Image (cartoon, grey):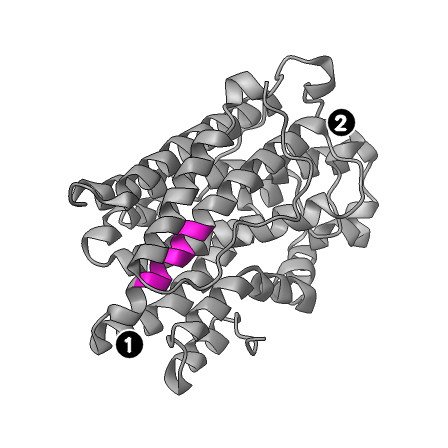
Amino acid sequence: MTPAPSSTDAREGDHRVAGRSAYEAVIERLSKASVDKHWEPYRDIPWDDPEFLVDPADPRWELPEVDKLGGHPWYRSRPPEVRAAIGLWRVATAMKVGLQFENLLKRGLLNYAYRLPNGSPEFRYVYHETIEEGHHGMMFQEFVNRTGMPIRGMPGPLSAVAQVAPWIPLISTELFFVFVLGGEDPIDHVQRKVLKDERAHHPLEETIMRIHIAEEARHISFARHYLRDRVPRMPVHRRLMLGFAAPIILGVMARIMLAPPLAMIKHFRIPSNVVSEVYLRNTAAKNEIRDSVGRTRELCAELGLVNALTRRIWRAMGIWAEPR
């Protein structure tokens, strides 16, 4: 069994590279890392270890401070087993939404790879990433199954609309990889914060998050390097269109990945005023959404996709902050 990584500090390097040969060297390094350092859900996670069993009343499922509901008086006044069940539902929903996003991502990656020429270094890496995302989907679904909860993930209408995502590479590969970052960066941001909050975490949740963070670092790095290589070479009109589309995609994706599940709100009868206070009118919750796309926002600024016009869209989507 390959042990889960013990630290979340290291990220795949995504520093700017100059020239096609340097870019290809990065892709080859990421492909090699996928061979040397990877995990398989049914080999590397001891699902049936007594310490890894899922008990909905386990207090370690209680919501962390990173989820604003966790500190609200309504939540704190619930019985311990209810607080734990709400937290477990939240975790399971995040994993279900994550596997649904990665399902769309895998199909989009394969559409992208289908048209790559012989000898393309991206082809090998994209297949490595597709395999890893397949493992993540199995890992997330197994966790959801073991909760015994009726977890749905994305709402039906949203799931239907999302089916267009795998076809984005046929229109614009650059737009597709902005979509990729829009789904991956917010979850990476939250999972890193959760693992650094010094709380006692359930070992199954912690193992899954550490594996996911380690492999997603490569996926995020590839998307960032791809955009750095391609965007500067785009025609001006297409680059302008990408600049308008990027904040819309990132704003929508961040809310999809971080929003509280409606089914959880209904199941536990969370009052509408509590939901409003915690998620809709809460400055800290809005800042969390803004900060979750911070690295991608800075990348867009670096690539010249932010100007006086597009900055208004970033602000309207609630995800603008001055780049560092």
In percent of the image, x 79 and y 53: which residue is there?
71
In the picture provided, is 102 more to the left or to the right than 113? Answer: right
Note whether residue 153 is visible: no
Q: Nearer the viewer, residue 38 or 291?
A: 38
Does residue 23 belong to the magenta stretch? no
Residue at the bottom extreme?
308
In the picture provided, is 199 more to the left or to the right than 193? Answer: right
In the picture provided, is 303 more to the left or to the right than 67? Answer: left
- For badge 2, the amino acid type reads Ala
* Residue 122 percent across, percent down from the top left: 29, 45
Residue 266 position (above or below residue 244):
above
Locate the N terminus by quadrant: top right
* Residue 53 percent across, percent down from the top left: 68, 18
Residue 165 position (above or below residue 103):
below
Q: Which of 134 and 303 is in front in this view?
A: 303
- Main SS of the magenta part reads helix
In percent of the image, x 29 and y 63: which residue is there?
230
In percent of the image, x 50 and y 23: which residue is there?
40
* Residue 145 percent across, percent down from the top left: 54, 22
Q: What stretch is highlighted in magenta?
A: 221-229
Residue 236 position (above or below residue 185):
below
- The residue pinned by badge 2 equals 57
Does residue 226 belong to the magenta stretch? yes
Locate the C terminus by quadrant: bottom right
- The residue pinned by badge 1 equals 240
User: Badge 2: how crowded within 10 Å, few (<14), some, or many (20+)?
Assistant: some
**Distance between mark 2 and mark 1 Cα atoms:** 51 Å
Note whether residue 81 is visible: yes
- For badge 1, the amino acid type reads Leu
